[in-house]
Amino acid sequence: MTESDLFAPVKTLFENQGYTVNAEVKDCDLTAVKDDELIITELKRSLSVHLLAQALTRQKSGAKVYVAVPKPKNYNPKKFRETLYVLKKLELGLIFVTLRGDFSFAETIYDPLPFVPVAENKKKRAAILKEIDGRTLDKNVGGITGKKIVTAFCERNIQIACALDALGEMSPAQVKAATGIEKAASILSMNAYGWFKKVRRGVYAVTEKGRREILDYPELEQYYTQKLLRGADE
């Protein structure tokens, strides 16, 4: 399959809408004109940064610009949503071409329209900043999948488990005083990781599972244990 294979279906798509279509005009793969409207379409075998940059350059002519690529196999609109958002933000149109010999056809997925900026989601922004503020030693590595992510919530659990391990059985109020964690009581009650156990009414201890699993986070375990012991000595 070559880029030229995409030309005929896209040409037919615009001609059926009443446009006059030409190929290779001033380095533009395809132009379509109707009245005073000019459309430029760049044909490529796949979406790429190079294609987007080329299409953006074509916008300088004042034309509406589309990119035309073969329709992906097993196309899923939901999975393609982020790519479509990028195209919308760049004010580029998208055409998919299905190649089936004499039965090939092109379809418009999105027209190039003025981009309307999305409203700031203050809740999402606040949630991100709260998560950042809740982390002490960020040992996560961006881009890695299949490994544990140390969230602020996970870190609070580690801190409480370290406190119970180092200082012994405590009430939620004592844990709060030792760690400074305002929601210590709810974290102990939730026991999301199975690290805590109630030894008697209003008193908690760390479980063997907790002692074992906080060692999976050696930097945090060492940091909080030393911090607690220093505080106890003062």
Image: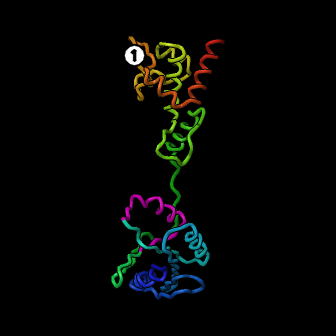
- Residue 16 sits in which quadrant? bottom left
Q: Position of residue 222 (x, y in %)?
A: 59, 25
Q: Is residue 144 magenta?
A: no
Mark 1: few, some, or many residues within 10 Å (few <14, many ≥20)? some
Vertical arrangement, residue 145 with respect to residue 77, above or below = above
Q: Where does label 1 land, which residue?
A: 198
Q: Position of residue 23 (x, y in %)?
A: 52, 87
Q: Position of residue 136 (x, y in %)?
A: 60, 32
Q: Is residue 75 magenta?
A: yes
Residue type highlighted by circle 1: Lys
Report whether residue 51 is seen: yes
Report whether residue 112 is seen: no
Q: Position of residue 133 (x, y in %)?
A: 58, 35
* Left or right: 79 as drawn, with respect to 53: left
Instruction: Tell me what residue is drawn at x 50 percent, y 75 percent.
Output: 44
Magenta residues span 74-96
Instruction: Tell me what residue is drawn at x 50 percent, y 85 percent.
Output: 33
Vertical arrangement, residue 6 with respect to residue 137, above or below = below
Vertical arrangement, residue 36 with respect to residue 234, above or below = below
Towards the viewer: 175 or 226: 226
Q: Identify the residue at the far right of this view.
A: 234
